[in-house]
Amino acid sequence: MRFFNTAGPIDATTHYALDPLKRWDLPEVLSLIDQRKYFLVHAPRQTGKTTCLRALARHLNQQGRLRCLYLSFETGQAARQNVPAAVQGILSRLGVEAKRQLQDTFADENWQAILAKHGPLEAFYVTLSTWCEESSKPLVLLIDEIDALVGDALIS
């Protein structure tokens, strides 16, 4: 039996839910993505941001023209001001999620060497840019919980 969920992302098979792709202007979001623009989803807590981002990632991957990865930066929260630890956690999560969501092992196989060579201030950029160059399709990265980072970890 389905129920109302107020703690975390919605799973339409077990929770009552509105179609997350109908909760925002999907054609406008897709237009921004096609134009390679950044966009921000801002709303109060527990209003469905994560659910919508995950649904968008599935939608884009099902279309097949792009490869889309949903990534939460929440893993970097515990690092607080420790930039190397935050970057290491985020890159590790990037590798795991790329493998899980896209069956792509590039980030997982390369982030540690990139971090060692380029350091914590450049490793995320170098990992993403190199991965994009290697990818057969354009990559879209949907970042969630960026506000979990604080201080220098957020700035870097």
Image (spheres, grey):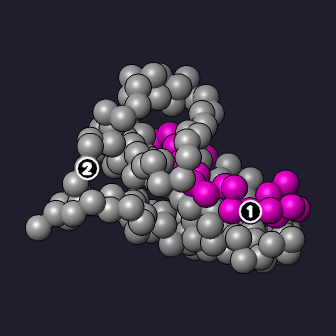
What is the spatial separation of the Cα atoms under label 1 and label 2, in whole angstroms?
Answer: 29 Å
Question: Residue at 22% of width from left, 54% of height from top?
Answer: 16
State yes or no: residue 16 in magenta: no
Q: Amino acid at mark 2?
A: Ala
Q: Give x and y (percent) for residue 102.
A: 40, 59
Q: Nearer the viewer, residue 44 or 135?
A: 44
Question: Residue at 62% of width from left, 33% of height from top?
Answer: 38
As drawn, the label of residue 149 is 1
150 w.r.t. 31: above or below = below
Question: Residue at 69% of width from left, 55% of height from top?
Answer: 147
78 w.r.t. 43: above or below = below
Question: Is label 1 or label 2 in front?
Answer: 2
Q: Give x and y (percent) for residue 55.
A: 35, 47
35 w.r.t. 44: above or below = above
Element on which disc 2 rests: loop
Q: Nearer the viewer, residue 126 or 42?
A: 42
**Rendered-image quadrant of the C terminus:** bottom right
Question: Residue at 42% of width from left, 64% of height from top?
Answer: 8
Q: Nearer the viewer, residue 88 or 154?
A: 154
Q: Give x and y (percent) for residue 145.
A: 61, 57
Q: Amino acid at mark 1?
A: Leu
Q: Residues within 10 Å of mark 1 (few under 14, many from 20)?
A: many
Q: Which residues are magenta?
A: 133-156
State yes or no: residue 148 in magenta: yes
> Would residue 58 be found to the left or right of residue 98 on screen?
left
Using the rendered image of the protein, determine whether residue 4 is visible from the camera's viewpoint. Answer: yes
Q: Residues within 10 Å of mark 2 (few under 14, many from 20)?
A: some
**Rendered-image quadrant of the N terminus:** bottom left
Q: Nearer the viewer, residue 117 or 70?
A: 70
Residue identifier under label 2: 17
Q: Give x and y (percent) for residue 57.
A: 40, 47
